[in-house]
Amino acid sequence: MGKKLITKNNYNGFVSQENNKLYVSGSMILSPGVKDILREKGIGIVYGEKPESADGESSSDVVDLESSIVNMLKKDFNIAEGEDMDSIVAKVLKKLDHKGGFIHGK
């Protein structure tokens, strides 16, 4: 299996919402530009697997998609929380669900 390249365009999806860190496993490569962005934003870089959460499930296996979308909208698109944010998140989740059943249990 190939490695994932983490760039300035996709890093938000890999940042832990719990502790504002990006865990870099052996299957990931960070671009030089994203390292600079992470430092500027105060996001820690941790080389190694993310520790398991309190419920015993690996946090990398349990993706909080909604939080990732909200984080991306705030940081990359400067959209403030409110009705617009809620509407956009709902539309994205609906679109993802229709594009292959990515959202289970919603």
Image (tube, rainbow, N blue to C red):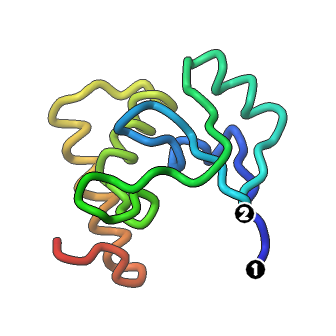
**Which disc, if any, is residue 1?**
1
- Where residue 9 appears, x then y in whole percent? 65, 43
Residue drawn where x is 51% and y is 34% of the image: 21
- Where residue 80 appears, x then y in whole percent? 29, 24
**Which disc, if any, is residue 64?**
none
Three-letter code, disc 2: Ser
Q: How far is mark 2 from mark 1, CA to CA?
A: 8 Å
- Where residue 60 appears, x then y in whole percent? 46, 60
Residue drawn where x is 64% and y is 15% of the image: 40
Q: Which quadrant of the figure contains the N terminus?
A: bottom right
Q: Secondary structure at mark 2?
A: loop
The residue carrying mark 2 is 27
Q: Secondary structure at mark 1?
A: loop
Q: Nearer the viewer, residue 54 or 70?
A: 54
Residue drawn where x is 56% and y is 40% of the image: 22
Q: Residues within 10 Å of mark 2 (few under 14, many from 20)?
A: few
Three-letter code, disc 1: Met
Q: Are marks 2 and 1 in contact (CB under 8 Å)?
A: yes
